[in-house]
Amino acid sequence: MSVLPLNPPDVQIPLLELRHVSKRFVKPIDAATRIANLFGAGVEQEVVHAVDDVTLTIRRGEVVGLVGESGCGKSTLGRMAVGLHSLSAGTRFWKGEDLSLLNAATRRQKQLAIQMIFQDPTASLNPRMRVQDIIGEAPVVHGMVPAAEQQIYVEQLLERVGLDPTVVRRFPHQFSGGQRARIGIARALAVKPEFLVCDEAVAALDVSIQAQVLNLFIRLRDELNLTYLFISHDLGVVRHLADRVVIMYLGRIVESASADAVFSHANHPYTQALLASAPKLEVRKLEFFAVKGEIPSPLHPPAGCHFHPRCPHAMARCQVEVPMLREVAPAHFSACHLND
Ligand code: SF4
């Protein structure tokens, strides 16, 4: 067994690499608390450790499924990958280049290749804009398409995502949920991305529509040579789509392996619990948390293994020692002291 290498030997430079990234959100103290502190109340700022020292490497053409319960930090990590959240610590590389070293204009230009598809297509589409402007605004602003050719460009994109191009002048409320999801995908594709972060992109859809949109993602990957970070709490969705699965718990990656390995030989006790709970992840979550004492959360992460004290195999060292990701089988990494 060996510790996870930061740069595994590979001739291909990763498309995206997050190296030891963390994200902390600090809740500001309100005026009343500040006054109370003047009189010695001693109330401290609350710090949420949303993402804690995560290293994630994604290669061109991969579909990486990022799985975990609500609040585990997976959406925050996705937003960090896209550049919507700054990093509290760590480094983000795009094609081997440290993005923090670029000036703002160059970084913005490079980041066009990394786009995000959001969970709620209704909330993410401006209800006052027509489809032509929703999809066509960014490529025109960034000089990718002349304004005079915007409509034909948008019509081609609508066809690519399986929509009738004649709807180009309509507003979002005139579409079904599945059609709005396709409009969101077309908007992301409009700036010719290479990498898509899909954050619960089918979670709000009916099951039959989910399957259609997942098949669309698969077709687009093949046609456009796309790479995906597919964030989901639904193991069934990830199993359908992902080449590699990364499991997060309380801000840390606890296991990473090929989809086949995760679903057939999960190593980490948390992954095993997740698989045992599927498909009723949210219901089981309540049972998991039925432990005595303070509930582990990003606000109160345990000092050692984040899965302590919920883990049935917890040992004394798990309380104080953070388990490292170790290779337990070829390209299969798990962070658990049972592997030491
Ligand atoms: Fe369980 Fe300890 Fe492994 Fe964490 S490190 S998963 S508490 S055995």
Image: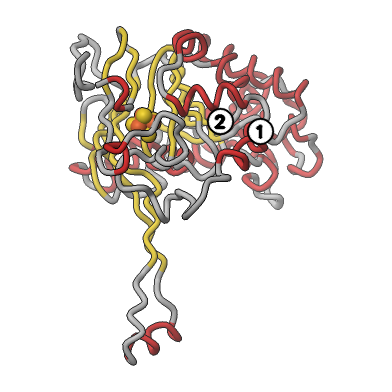
> In the rendering, at what x and y percent does residue 58 appear?
35, 22
Residue 262 appearing in the image: yes
Q: Is residue 147 left or right of residue 111?
A: right
Which image quadrant: the N terminus?
Answer: top left
Depicted 233 relative to depicted 80: above or below:
above
Q: Check disc 1 and report the residue beneath it.
A: 203
> In the rendering, at what x and y percent does residue 66 appear?
47, 28
Mark 2–mark 1 CB contact (< 8 Å): yes
Three-letter amino acid code at the position of disc 2:
Ser
Label 2 neighbour load within 10 Å: few <14, some 14-19, many 20+: many
Q: Quadrant of residue 35 in the image?
A: bottom left
Q: Nearer the viewer, residue 192 or 235?
A: 235
Q: At 47% across and 38% down in the image, what residue appears? A: 310
Q: Quadrant of residue 170 in the image?
A: top right
Q: Quadrant of residue 34 in the image?
A: bottom left
Q: At 64% across and 14% down in the image, what residue appears? A: 215
Depicted 120 relative to depicted 215: above or below:
below
Q: Check disc 2 and report the residue beneath it.
A: 232
Q: Nearer the viewer, residue 226 or 128?
A: 226
Three-letter amino acid code at the position of disc 1:
Ala
Q: At 43% across and 33% down in the image, what residue appears? A: 248
Quadrant containing ligand 1: top left
Depicted 162 relative to depicted 46: above or below:
above
> In the rendering, at what x and y percent does residue 48 appear?
40, 56
Q: At 39% across and 88% down in the image, what residue appears? A: 36
